[in-house]
Image: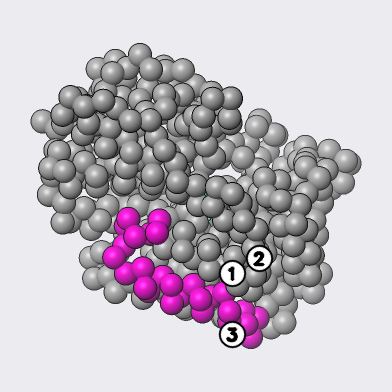
């Protein structure tokens, strides 16, 4: 028998289970992968700058020192909120007094023809590794005479689209310098809006635009994707871009389990929660992180899908569970806003720091990015110093001159034992 059930081992679920487990609450965490995946570093995996194993960590290792947390590897096929029960794909059902839904999000293709079939989403380690292998195969085929397009089209000019475009442009340029990529291969970034990084200040937008442009990215604003084919993308302005690599950073919605749970949902199919993170009408049920629509105040928009929101809300829901177990009053979630930031390439980053959005760019913005991400990672790794050392090197080093064989990217020196390495099954479904 368990006192609390947590669905999802992302930043939100891990924070919730850790807080509960450290308070001695018998907690079961269920995830369909046996590892936690750190999404902010996925594009480094996709662009061959980090091996997939470096951004994933076995959940059992994370909870090795927290004996009251039990990790179950299973796909949850349905959730009954009324009796706080999860049904697993192996036929088992798990119930508890408290159920924390932390199942994250999945790519949203908005019904655009061909997008689901031909585009590469970037939401999981499996996605990132599939994209890397696809790109690597195209590079290899170019060397033996294949003349098909090597262009990459990135859909969506938010932080993920901008970051992956910047990193890919550097990779393409470096491969071209080595003669391993045709000279005309390009990265295109497509967005319906009038600026990249729509939620940032106009100064940050201009900075990002300038750096992407300088890196050789073809930025197409005010254009949406009409259809994705196996070898081209059609835009709604009539343009056809020949490509075999479309990267989908164009939007996401809540995971399937959230949409079938039966509670009230809002933007992106996310579960509506009260300010205390409980789900109205379902005592003992909580929703946190990307799967939840978390209010930020009367009349204000809900909180964004960010690592800090996920980690803090997971911890807060667990603290409210502890309060309710002790008969104390629940507390409304108070988000400590770290700001928003994006890395555009080596030596180029923008950040709007803290709730007051203090604008910085360049190395200072990168330092802010580093601080926030080290804090996020500290929930799953004790060696944040290894991350800091890798990241400074990554930011400052001349990419084109050094990295390009990519058979052995510089690793984060986590110092994990061999049995701490996650098992990443590329055949497994990456989302749902
Ligand atoms: C490419 C990318 C880059 C990002 N970069 C940044 C950044 O730089 N800074 C930042 O702050 N934020 C960033 N974000 C956002 C941030 O990573 C997310 O907001 C945060 O990780 C969400 O955490 P979560 O725990 O809610 O969900 P997730 O991390 O998605 O975890 C959900 C877990 O639930 C499991 N799960 C789902 N459904 C089931 C099921 N049916 N059965 C069993 N298990 C299930 C999944 O396997 C997964 O492990 C980025 C996101 C992406 C995709």
Magenta segment main secondary structure:
helix
- Residue 317: percent from left, percent from top: 32, 35
Counting the numbered discs, the total is: 3
Residue 237 located left or right of residue 35: right
Q: Quick one: quadrant of the N terminus?
A: top left
Q: Compare residues 103 and 153 and report the one nearer the observer.
A: 103
Magenta region, residue range: 375-402
Residue 423, given in percent of the width and then of the height, sits at: 32, 57
Helix, strand, or loop for circle 2? strand
Hey, which residue is sitting farthest right in the picture?
238
User: What distance separates the C-alpha of mark 3 from that of mark 1?
Assistant: 24 Å
- The 10 Å Cα crowd at callout 3, few under 14, some 14 to 19, many 20 or more, is few
Label 2 sits on residue: 361
Query: Can you identify the residue that label 3 sits on?
Result: 402
Mark 3, secondary structure of its residue: helix
Q: Residue at x 58, y 79 (%)?
A: 396
**Which residue lies at the image location 49% right of the left edge and 21% below the top edge?**
265
Mark 2 close to ligand 1, CB under 8 Å: no
The answer to whether marks 2 and 1 mark residues whose Cβ atoms lie closer than 8 Å is yes
């Amino acid at each position: 028998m368990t006192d609390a059930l947590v669905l999802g081992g992302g930043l939100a679920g891990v924070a919730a289970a850790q807080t509960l487990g450290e308070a001695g609450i018998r907690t079961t965490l269920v995830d369909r992968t046996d590892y936690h995946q750190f999404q902010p570093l996925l594009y480094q995996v996709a662009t061959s700058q980090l091996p997939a194993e470096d951004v994933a960590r076995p959940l059992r290792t994370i909870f090795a020192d927290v004996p009251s947390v039990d990790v179950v590897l299973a796909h949850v096929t349905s959730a009954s909120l009324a009796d706080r029960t999860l049904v697993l794909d192996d036929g088992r059902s798990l119930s508890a007094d408290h159920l924390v839904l932390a199942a994250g999000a999945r790519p949203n293709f908005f019904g655009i023809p061909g997008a689901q079939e031909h585009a590469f989403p970037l939401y999981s380690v499996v996605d990132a590794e599939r994209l890397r292998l696809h790109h690597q195969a195209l590079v290899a085929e170019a060397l033996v005479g294949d003349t098909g397009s090597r262009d990459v089209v990135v859909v969506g000019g938010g932080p993920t689209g901008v970051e992956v475009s910047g990193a890919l442009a550097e990779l393409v340029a470096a491969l071209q310098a080595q003669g391993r990529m045709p000279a005309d291969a390009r990265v295109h970034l497509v967005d319906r809006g009038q600026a990249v990084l729509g939620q940032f200040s106009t100064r940050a937008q201009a900075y990002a635009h300038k750096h992407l442009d300088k890196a050789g990215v073809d930025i197409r604003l005010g254009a949406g994707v009409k259809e994705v084919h196996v070898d081209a993308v059609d835009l709604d302005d009539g343009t056809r871009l020949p490509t075999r690599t479309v990267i989908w950073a164009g939007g996401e919605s809540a995971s399937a389990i959230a949409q079938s749970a039966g509670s009230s949902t809002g933007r992106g199919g996310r579960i509506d929660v009260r300010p205390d993170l409980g789900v109205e009408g379902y005592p003992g049920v909580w929703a946190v992180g990307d799967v939840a629509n978390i209010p930020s105040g009367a009349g204000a928009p809900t909180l964004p899908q960010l690592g800090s929101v996920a980690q803090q809300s997971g911890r807060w829901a667990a603290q409210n569970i502890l309060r309710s177990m002790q008969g104390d009053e629940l507390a409304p979630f108070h988000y400590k806003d770290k700001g928003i930031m994006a890395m555009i390439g080596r030596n180029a980053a923008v950040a709007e720091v803290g709730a007051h959005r203090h604008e910085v760019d360049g190395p200072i913005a990168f330092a802010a990015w580093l601080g926030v991400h080290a804090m996020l990672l500290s929930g799953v790794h004790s060696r944040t110093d290894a991350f800091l050392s890798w990241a400074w090197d990554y930011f400052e080093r001349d990419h084109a001159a050094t990295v390009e064989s990519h058979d052995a990217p510089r690793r984060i020196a986590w110092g994990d034992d061999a049995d701490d390495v996650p098992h990443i099954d590329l055949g497994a479904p990456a989302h749902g």
